[in-house]
Image (cartoon, coloured by chain):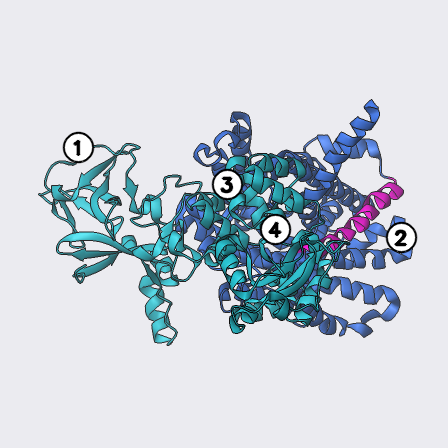
Amino acid sequence: MYRPEKTFYLADLIGTTVTDASGATVGRVVDFTFLVGGKFPKINQAVVQAAGRAEKHVVPRERFQTFGTDGYVLAAPLREMPRLLDCPEQFLARSIWDKQIIDTSDIRVVRVNDLEIAEVRGDWYLIAIDVGVQGLLRRLGFDRWICPLFERLRWPVRHEVIAWDLVQSFPTGFSPLKLAVPSNKVKDMHPADLADILEDLSVQEGISLIQTLDDETAAETLAEADAETQAQIISSLPPHEASDILEEMEPDEAVDILQDLDDRKAAEILSHMEPSEASDVRELLKHDENTAGGLMSTGYATIYEEFTVADAFKHLRLVAVDLEIIYYLYVIDHNNRLKGVVSIRDLLVADPTTPISGIMDKDLVFVSPETPQEEVASLISKYNLMGLPVLNSEGVMLGVVTIDDVMELLLENMPRMWKRRALSS
Amino acid sequence: MALRSWWRRWRIRLLFFLSIFGPGLITATVDNDAGGIATYSLAGAIYGFDLLWTLIPITVLLIVTMEMSARLGAVTGQGLADLLRERFGVKVTFWLLSLVFVANIGTVLSEFSGIASAIDIFAATLGFGAGLWWLKYLLIPLITYGLFKVVTEYEYTKIEKVFLLSIVFYIAYPISAWMAGPDWGTTLKALFVPVLRFDAGYLFTMIAVIGTTITPWMQFYLQSTFIEKGVTLKTWRTAKWDVILGCLTTDVISFFMIVACAVTLFQRPGVPAVQTIDDIGKALAPLAGSYAGILFSLGLFNASVFGAAILPLSTSFAICEGMGWERGMNKTYEEAPFFYGLFIALLVVGAGLVLIPGADFLYLAVMRASQFAQGLILPPFLYFLVKLGDDRQLLGAHANGPWLSRFSWFCVGVLTLIDLVLLGSTIWEIVA
């Protein structure tokens, strides 16, 4: 893009009078339309309100003799221009002003106060949205006296714009038409950041955001969101969409969400899931959500005592892609009873021909499925574990509680002010 | 067997109702805050039964407007200020929120006046007289700091139910009214037969009664609690009954408050029987005898603290929502400076102004005047609320039906008319 010759704000353009060639006023500018496509949308038409009448006309730029801050002079009579109908045009003021938009660089939801337009080689482009106080004052018509006043007080009013290519719009109640933006920037955002945004949106907006994502990203995003948001969104999505997203999650995360829904809704979503995924989830659903059984995950690797280190690596390479926990490998006998554990570090430093039984740690820390989550959390933090195996009374391995499953719990128990400080620092 | 399955079904419904129950009732309870108590009491004390008839139309309008904003929240999942901004643009939102802000400063002041009065009356009734005049200078800063801490550091919604205790206090009014033994025939007649008077004082009190019952900030508050509780269309039918029940409860209490004060305090039409707030407490004398002051001050204290906790928060939240500023207790001070700034400023201004020496005599006046201000800004606010409720693009099949819409517009018209008549009669009295 070339350097802009001039930039303006939409608030300063709207309301300007339109004259004919003789200088008589025929109306005033009330909006502009823009073309979708390209990095910055091009502004192609003005919406003109006819003076003294209710009609609005759409006037292409080419039909103006003069177009810009120097005035708007029409080359042809206004009544020859097409009337504004409820056509699927994209409007600057009507569709973007005052709407919420996602700022993908700072990861937050902002409200559009004003729009910045640049003139490049005679064409107008929408280049940025103004989300600062200055934009707000400009819209209210106060900027002319408040901004210089604060300037003099050495406390200038914040000017804050975000480039158009860094924002992402989403449909709301008043603008159900999704603004087409060249690339879907939301897809490039980290799921944890998306989850922050999701928590700031209303349920309806959140659903439309989730629906723009592919199932895998949607699953990762939801997994990062707080329990309330998860439950609200999953229960409001159509069951087949909800089940598609849950299938992409780790079974223990899916179970966490399902346990927060009412039973009928959970059963409905489960019935739409793939049978194999659904049976994993059903198995986990048997446990109370506040116990080790409810927290544990089944995505871990098991090996046998008679394996060598090389065998273990070979096995891990095959299965690792679907696993949640790869830091530990659990050594079991042929009855699925847990015998020991080796970490990736143990394997890396050992000779490839060493038998696993020689390096595995037999001094096991484990819990039963009924162990309350607080105890699980304190064991994990006491022994500095990445994961804690869950065994039934016969010593058969059922699952693993990982550190991130209890992270929330450790954070939740902090007073809110501490948490805020911890998270902001 | 049939009975058991019937009970099963109803038990599920009941549990479900209780789980989302609350926003309506709590919002309605805040309705009878310091300003509410003062306004209803003065209405009864000065005009006897003459304003009772307004309660029925007010209740209908309260239900209509509360239902409308709750429905907007349930359908769109967005706050009222958000919707105003997206539908009517920044100018309308700014000016409307400015009106709400000014009226709410008054109401915050009235909550703190209520706290201060409660402390004074309590000290006085215990027999310390004016010897404990300094007590409020000690307690109000502590209470303000405590409110700030509680609201910012704890899940407020978890403790707000504590304030429902005030319902116990409100039950004192029906009992006291009953024991004072009014002529129930006359009372009922006054409830159904309108008394139209056009003097400025009567209209002023009428607008204050309307303004203390139906207030813009409650609509903002209700809609945001609905969203926070995750009420969506699926749970809407149950939540709606919570709202209606809350509205009915609040106005039944208002009715008995007016009756109790009318019986005990009203003397002759037009002659103000009460001069200060502690006189109002005497309406509880038939029930509590010489302990009326203590009962009254405890109730007033609870109601005022409840209001002082909610009002600054909800005002700041609504303004930041409308202006698009970061808000909410999960944000840091750096992230949401406007939100915390407004919240703290409202608390400090409220607590600071009532502690100005000599302000005591103004407490009662402030309490009523702030409710009058709320009543005055009601017509423009309702105009935009009803427009939102009518919007088919936004609400689809859940928009106002033709009769509800007509009725709402009729109410907006009547309220505007009352405002104008008051304006006219005030000018008339000044000129005459």
Q: Residue B41: where, in percent of width, then height?
A: 74, 49
- Label 3 with label 1: CB-CB less than 8 Å: no
Mark 3 and mark 1: span between their CA atoms?
53 Å
Kindly identify which residue carries mark 1.
A79
Neighbourhood count class around disc 4 (C-alpha, 10 Å): few under 14, some 14–19, many 20 upward: many
Q: Colour of chain A?
A: cyan
- Can you see residue B83? no
At x 60%, y 66%, the residue is A356
Q: Which mark is residue A244?
A: 3
Mark nearer the N terminus (3 vs 1) = 1
Q: Give the number of the mark in front: 3 or 1.
A: 3
Front residue of B227/B168: it is B227
* Chain (blue): B
Chain for numbered disc 3: A
Mark nearer the N terminus (3 vs 4) = 3
Q: Amino acid at mark 2?
A: Ala
Q: Which residue lies most toward the bottom here?
A: A154
Q: Residue B5: where, in percent of width, then height?
A: 79, 27
User: Quarter of the image containing the N terminus of chain A?
Assistant: bottom left
SS class, disc 1: helix
